[in-house]
């Protein structure tokens, strides 16, 4: 394994695989904060060059967190298809990149090879890709999943409708929810982030979601994103739940900081089989985001792209319905500006798909970052072109509870219209039936929930 | 719940102002958006221009974002600090940019500044209150002069010795650890600007701890948040925060431990 290179008459030597991976990253404030980033632009490229010549086996044999210490590493390593791995273990990371971009490599070919990759390999090849490489390679892949409906089929583009409210007021949430539906949002999920993480609050909201879903026969999924343990308790007490949500990290230590273990997820899955309200089989919803491991000191000196890839490797073991990278929520100490946010969004989507999870993205920013609404509109359009499963929709882009901005309810229709994409088929038919769209275009009723839902049922 | 009841609820939820009667599609297209809902401050009932936001909605959003950005990036006015007689101490951050990207530097002071902080409060006190800009200078500008007199007076009324307040520029919550170490204050309270949302950039928090030490668990901090005219107003907040600080001093604990007591 060669960890040395010469670039522009300057010689560079890297400590180990973890060091190469970190320094090969595109510039991220979080890697700088962690003290693992390249010290110069030239060093960054030198690391990419060294990385391009490393073998798939070099990366597999050097996980950034030791196998013995970490169940995320164990789940990823034990999940590798050894037969496929044997075929590709001697490929260099450059060769893997060429394979992914090769016009002869179609979806099935890539998906077969991807079963032989660990998360470090997925992250490694990502670091050798330009933004258009990431868009193009990801666009070859679709990762559908089924809860009540099927998300992620080619030609579709879905949204999670996020009707958050500052006090979890049921009428307030309802008003936002119906507004969002009236713009064609919500085919992936009607999903609320509660202020109050309690069984009582989440059950109240879930019951309202279920009523509306039933009343208007809406083919979709619902979820209240409380802590996994609160959700398990609510499910035991009979709350109507299609799926269970949890934020995850790329190391066991990070997951423990989030207050759960692998056993907790297994318990949630088993409980949903017997008590859940959805068809399945995909009933988990995970959220991730570059930098979360560093924020809980659970990154083991690794860079944030590699840790993020490990989230997807871990998520895959639970066959989720949705994985959502909340890309710009964490703040400028991890992703400084729109350039870094857009890059991270494209990386996460690519890595998620290559890992085999149904990937979506909350294209978002906080007010202390160097980013604005134009940037999340850019990112959503780039991801929709890459075949992302879903993005988020909130009223006019402003989430009044989480105090950050993401895509507006309006954006889904604009993006579908611009790129010729459709919602999930059953939801599409529902929109037509309710008069919200006609032949896929918003009608004069769209955006007027009082006229769509206020009328007595026919 | 019957179907009719549900429909009623929904209609009530949406309709503070009933939209125009169903008329021709052309008339609908030009119906002005409904006025702001009473059930939520979310930007609903905003109408649309094709698939996009109407110009008024778009510009209102831009204006609110601009105000939030200014709250993060502008300094607390020097006149306010003068008027309140608060000396300014700067953390190890050299710029706003560094403050935003290096949370570790926003909690520590240089040797020279540390000496000045210690000299400002040479005698150990029972309760020390100071302000920090945090992520919103506007929050400090809007609330500090209202909350500070209430706080110091209520602390004195409880028979506790209140330290001399000051202001920390580029300050994070965890700056309280070094401040406690430098001044020997038993209970520390930092009034700090919260990360602004689009709705308001004036929200301030009071973070408190009994004898905070570097590396202590976050669970040892107590916080009162949402202090601004649209949430918990500064005067009321002052009385409440003073009461909590008094309790911390009596019971010699803070955070989760204080709640369990």
Image (tube, coloured by chain):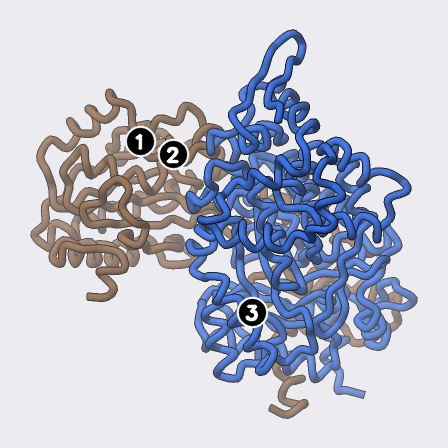
Q: Residue furthest top?
A: A9
B52 above or below A16?
A: below
Q: Nearer the viewer, residue B43 or B101?
A: B101
Q: Chain of mark 3?
A: A
Judged left or right of residue A266, residue B90 is left
Look at the numbered disc 1 and give the secondary structure of its residue. loop
Q: Nearer the viewer, residue B93 or A442?
A: B93
B151 above or below B14?
A: above
Question: Residue A344 in the image: x percent, y percent?
Answer: 64, 40
Look at the numbered disc 2 and give the secondary structure of its residue. loop
Q: Which chain is brown?
A: B
Question: Residue A301 in the image: x percent, y percent?
Answer: 47, 36
The residue shown at (76%, 58%) is: A143
- Disc 3 packing (10 Å; few <14; some 14–19; many ≥20): many
The residue to which callout 3 is attached is: A224
Q: Is disc 3 in contact with disc 2, using a CB cutoff of under 8 Å?
A: no
Q: Taking the image as drawn, is residue A189 in sight? A: yes
Work out how far the residue at label 1 is from the one at label 3, CA to CA, in angstroms.
Answer: 39 Å
Quarter of the picture containing the C terminus of chain A is bottom right
Q: Which circle marks residue B104 in the picture?
A: 2
Q: Colour of chain A?
A: blue
Q: Chain of mark 1?
A: B
Q: Which circle marks residue B108 in the picture?
A: 1
Look at the numbered disc 3 and give the secondary structure of its residue. strand
Judged left or right of residue A196, residue A284 is right
């Amino acid at each position: 394994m060669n960890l040395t290179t010469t670039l522009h008459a300057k010689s560079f030597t890297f400590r180990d695989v973890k060091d190469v991976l970190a320094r090969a990253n595109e510039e991220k404030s979080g890697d700088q904060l962690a003290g693992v980033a390249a010290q110069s632009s030239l060093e960054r490229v030198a690391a990419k060059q060294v990385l391009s010549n490393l073998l798939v086996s070099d990366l597999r044999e050097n996980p950034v967190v030791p196998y013995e210490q970490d169940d995320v590493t164990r789940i990823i390593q034990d999940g590798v298809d050894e037969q496929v791995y044997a075929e590709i273990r001697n490929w260099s990371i450059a060769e893997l990149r060429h394979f992914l971009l090769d016009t002869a490599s179609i979806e099935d070919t890539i998906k077969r090879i991807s079963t032989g990759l660990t998360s470090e390999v997925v992250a490694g090849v990502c670091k050798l890709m330009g933004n258009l490489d990431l868009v193009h390679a990801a666009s070859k892949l679709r990762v559908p999943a089924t809860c009540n409906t099927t998300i992620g089929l080619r030609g579709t583009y879905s949204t999670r409708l996020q009707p958050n409210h500052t006090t979890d007021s049921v009428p307030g949430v309802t008003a936002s929810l119906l507004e969002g539906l009236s713009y064609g949002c919500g085919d992936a999920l009607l999903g609320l982030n509660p202020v109050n993480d309690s069984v009582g609050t989440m059950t109240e909201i879930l019951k309202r979601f279920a009523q509306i879903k039933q009343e208007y026969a809406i083919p979709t999924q619902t979820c209240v994103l409380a802590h996994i343990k609160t959700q398990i308790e609510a499910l035991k007490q009979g709350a109507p739940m299609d799926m269970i949500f949890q934020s995850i990290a790329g190391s066991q230590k990070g997951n423990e900081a989030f207050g759960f273990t692998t056993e907790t997820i297994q318990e949630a899955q088993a409980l949903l089989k017997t008590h859940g309200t959805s068809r399945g089989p995909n009933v988990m919803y995970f959220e991730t985001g570059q930098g979360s491991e560093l924020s809980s000191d659970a990154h083991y000196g690794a860079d944030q792209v590699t840790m993020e890839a490990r989230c997807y490797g871990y998520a895959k073991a639970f066959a989720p319905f949705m994985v959502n990278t909340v890309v710009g929520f964490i703040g400028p100490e991890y992703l400084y500006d729109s350039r870094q946010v857009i890059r991270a969004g494209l990386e996460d989507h690519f890595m998620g798909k290559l890992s085999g999870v149904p990937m979506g993205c909350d294209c978002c920013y906080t007010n202390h970052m160097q980013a604005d609404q134009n940037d999340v509109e850019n990112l959503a359009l780039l991801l929709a072109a890459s075949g992302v499963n879903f993005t988020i929709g909130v009223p006019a882009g402003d989430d009044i509870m989480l105090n950050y901005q993401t895509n507006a309810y309006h954006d889904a229709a604009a993006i579908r219209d611009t790129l010729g994409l459709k919602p999930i088929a059953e939801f599409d038919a529902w929109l037509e039936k309710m008069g919200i769209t006609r032949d896929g275009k918003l009608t004069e009723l769209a955006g007027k929930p009082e006229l769509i839902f206020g009328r007595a049922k026919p | 719940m019957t179907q009719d009841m549900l429909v009623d609820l929904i209609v009530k939820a949406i309709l503070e102002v009933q939209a125009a009667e169903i008329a021709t599609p052309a008339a609908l297209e030009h119906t002005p958006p409904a006025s702001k809902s009473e059930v939520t401050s979310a930007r609903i009932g905003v109408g649309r221009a094709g698939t996009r936001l109407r110009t008024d909605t778009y510009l209102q959003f831009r204006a609110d974002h601009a105000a939030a950005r200014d709250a993060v990036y502008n300094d607390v006015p020097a006149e306010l600090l003068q008027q309140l007689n608060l000396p300014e101490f700067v953390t190890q951050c050299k710029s706003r940019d560094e403050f935003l990207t290096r949370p570790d530097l926003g909690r520590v002071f240089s040797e020279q500044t540390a000496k000045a902080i210690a000299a400002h409060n040479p005698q150990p006190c029972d309760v020390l209150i100071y302000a920090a800009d945090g992520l919103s200078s506007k929050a400090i500008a809007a609330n500090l002069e209202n909350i500070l007199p209430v706080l110091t007076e209520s602390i004195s009324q409880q028979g506790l010795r209140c330290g001399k307040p000051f202001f920390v520029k580029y300050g994070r919550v965890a700056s309280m650890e070094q401040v406690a170490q430098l001044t020997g204050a038993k209970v520390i309270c930092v009034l700090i600007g919260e990360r602004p949302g689009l709705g308001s950039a004036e929200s301030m928090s009071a973070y408190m701890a009994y004898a905070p030490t570097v590396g202590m668990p976050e669970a040892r901090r107590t916080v009162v948040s949402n202090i601004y005219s649209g949430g918990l107003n500064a005067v009321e907040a002052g009385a409440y925060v003073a009461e909590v600080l008094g309790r911390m001093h009596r019971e010699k604990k803070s955070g989760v431990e204080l709640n369990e007591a």
